Amino acid sequence: MNAFDAEGMYFKRFSRWKIIFILLAMALILTITFAVAMGPMQIPPLDVYKIIIKHIPFLGDFVGGGSSSTEEVIVLQVRLPRVLAAAIVGIALAVAGVVLQGLLRNPMADPYVIGISSGAGLGASLAIAFGFGLSFFGVLYSIPLMAFAFALGTVLLVYVISRTGQGVPMLTLLLVGIAVNSFLLAIISIIRLVSGEAVHAIMAWIFGSLAASNWNYVKMALPFVVIGVAIIYVFARDLNIMLLGEEQARHLGVDAERLKKIMIASATLITAAAVSISGIIGFIGLIIPHISRILVGPDHRILIPSSALGGAIVLILCDTIGRMIVRPAELPVGIITSLLGVPFFIYLIRKKKRSVIWQG
Amino acid sequence: MVTLKISGIDCYYGSVKALENVTFSVGEGEFVGILGPNGSGKTTLLKAINTTLKPKVGSVFLDNINIYDMESREVAKKVAVVPQETTVTFDFTALDVVLMGRNPYISRFGIESKEDLAVAKKAMELTNTWKLAERPVNELSGGEKQLVVIARALTQEPKVLLLDEPTVHLDIGNQLEIMELLKELCIKNSLIVLAVFHDFNLAARYCDSAILLRNGKIFSIGKVDKVLTEENINKVFNVNVIVKKHPITDALYILPISTSHEVTSTKNLRLHVICGGGVGTPIIKKLHRDGYYITAGVLNLLDTDYETCAMLKIPTVSEAPFSPITNDAHKKNLDMIDEADVVILSNACFGYGNFKNIESAIHAIEKGKTVIALEETPIQQRDFTKGEATALYEELKRKGALITKNCQEAIFMLRKLEHEFSKA
């Protein structure tokens, strides 16, 4: 390898990152278009753009008609909110996965592993079952807020149980997380049964489903995910340094304790927002960060944006597949992510052990 | 002139006191080794200086500024730490890791500038790691990785460099390379270098001064040759060592001999070995290991056999270096022989200087002692007295000395004697 141009190579990476980001953003737009076009009623992609632009203030005036009102309803009221919800959930889960893997220095970590998702699920279920109403601008924010509060509570509980005099051993944290997860999932099922929900709806929720998405869901989750991801991105360089271990990070001027708190709170926030609208979707938070790391490298400054976009693309595709393959019924997206995610993940582990497996 | 001043610090882990009233100061360009047994507070001292463990009493001052009043990023610009080992989760390149050292200089929303890269490049060139810049750090060897971590520390442009056993996982070549480098950096970059060592010899060779810790307190501090003395090391580590000045490196070297627990004799026979010129060393070592109580004489100081005996704490009758045996020493030797049960005459050369040693063997056999003569080479070839020694040797044989051609056989003979002796 030519080391003498290492400087040049180093600065090239920043432009490479920009190109990666732009390509992924374009891919996301294409994916959204494709997903909105696909369905029992195929809508030509160009019409999809026309319909969307038509309803954007000012821009709409420049686009002529031509689409039927049925198509408009399908695009604007049914498919678009669902696809956007998938994108938001995909972004949230993938970024939370990146953060937790980096922070815990453990490739097994994902948003579920330390109890965030089940805590969020419990909060969301309570809010739905007992109908706490807390809305701003007509959007019911009590669900994501309750989800966030319970998720944070669960994380704290897991943390406190795992703590020993010497700190928090990673293995204990993971084991306690798994145990608390199972326990809370049982309680969630009870609450939903008691509140009269059909068993298949509960199952759909536990597997994770986007079938019920509407614009309110999008509005409910979006602000939390945007804020959480923004906070996380601000600390991207600190996350890199944390990969040297907490102590060395401290020696390099990183306030490790504060960073851990901010990162766990942010990851909890975005996961809670995702869980509020989609239930518990597995595997996105685990595999998207790994795939991204293989493709763009371990630097969080590019890893976070590419995981976010990658998570959105993959979740939209999985949801579209779920909608299409057993028509007229549909498979919850969580089943698709597991069906496709597990074999792909195993393939990756076997193919490129070095990168996927934790350098212990 | 930057000084690091540690002023009366007490450090605790919970309620356990790890450091007590530690006070010293170090100036720039000084390379200080911190030594002491496990648990004596070496690493704790580094932690107190790098603000990881705040002292309950006292504080640490850099240039008269209390470092506990400084922002963590400011501390990171002044104090850099090199740990024993670094594991990096996921595949960062060596350059990535070195650039992380610039973190305290880059603002939250900034990216690495050309200047940052120039600093990193310079540090990597100094540590001879620039050629590794593009390699994933986890694929580097232990030595290369440690050099990269040192480059990262230099990239912080620190005043103080703290190292916790920086060479402990490395092979001897890498150890020396890193120590040479640290020494050079210390002088060239006017760094204050504090490093924890377990290896006395590395510390003695490269450090200007040393701090010897015991139970969280400074036991001794000062120039290396004042701190690393046989007495201090024995008191702190409970081991016997020999401290010498090395003729080539001109540094102290420290040779551990044994733990302070005396080797107790397990055998009943008491042996006296007549040797000199190093020929006695192999058999003395074997007998010592077998647990015999051994004496030796007459030996000149600086003789290899003498040093063996000194190391093993074997009582010897000694004579001044390169001098013939005096009557006085000869007399003492005979007294020692009288105390012994078996006398071993090693395969020594005899000249006029040590002629008395062969006489003392005759004395032994006349006193009724068992004499074993080790004859690896014929006496004629070892005789530098124109036949006088040979004559005495022949007399010794006639009087019933046991003759053996090798060391192993002598040991078998002794075992047999020991067996008979114990029965009687």
Image (tube, helix red, strand yellow):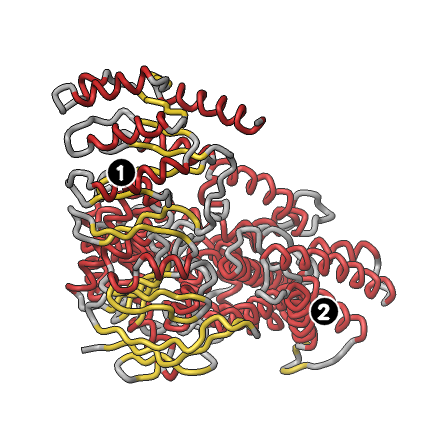
Q: Residue at x 17, y 66 (%)?
A: B189
Which residue is tagged 1? B298
For the residues labelled 2 and 1, the Cα–Cα distance comes to 93 Å
Instruction: Tell me: B258 left or right of B211.
Output: right
Residue B325 spot, x, y in % from top left: 20, 39
Residue B370, placed above or below residue A352: above
The type of residue carrying mark 1 is Val
Residue B320, placed above or below residue B21: above
Which chain contains the residue that carries disc 1? Answer: B
Residue A26 spot, x, y in % from top left: 42, 56
Is residue B141 visible to the viewer in this orientation of the structure? no
Dot 1 falls on a residue whose secondary structure is: strand
Specify few, some or many for label 1: CA neighbours under 10 Å numbering under 14, 14-19, or 20 or more. Answer: many
Residue A281, placed above or below residue B358: below
Nearest the eye: A249 or B189: B189
The type of residue carrying mark 2 is Ala
| The residue positioned farthest toward the left in the image shown | B386
Is residue B4 visible to the viewer in this orientation of the structure? yes
Residue A129 spot, x, y in % from top left: 80, 71
Specify few, some or many for label 2: CA neighbours under 10 Å numbering under 14, 14-19, or 20 or more. Answer: many
Residue B269, placed above or below residue A325: above
Q: Which corner quadrant holds the N terminus of chain A?
A: top left
Nearest the eye: A143 or B197: B197
Instruction: Tell me: B115 left or right of B68.
Output: left
Cβ–Cβ under 8 Å for marks 2 and 1: no
Nearest the eye: B411 or B173: B411
Residue B31 spot, x, y in % from top left: 24, 64
Instruction: Tell me: A351 left or right of B8.
Output: right
Count of marks placed on residues = 2
Which residue is tagged 2? A124
Q: Residue at x 70, y 81 (%)?
A: A134
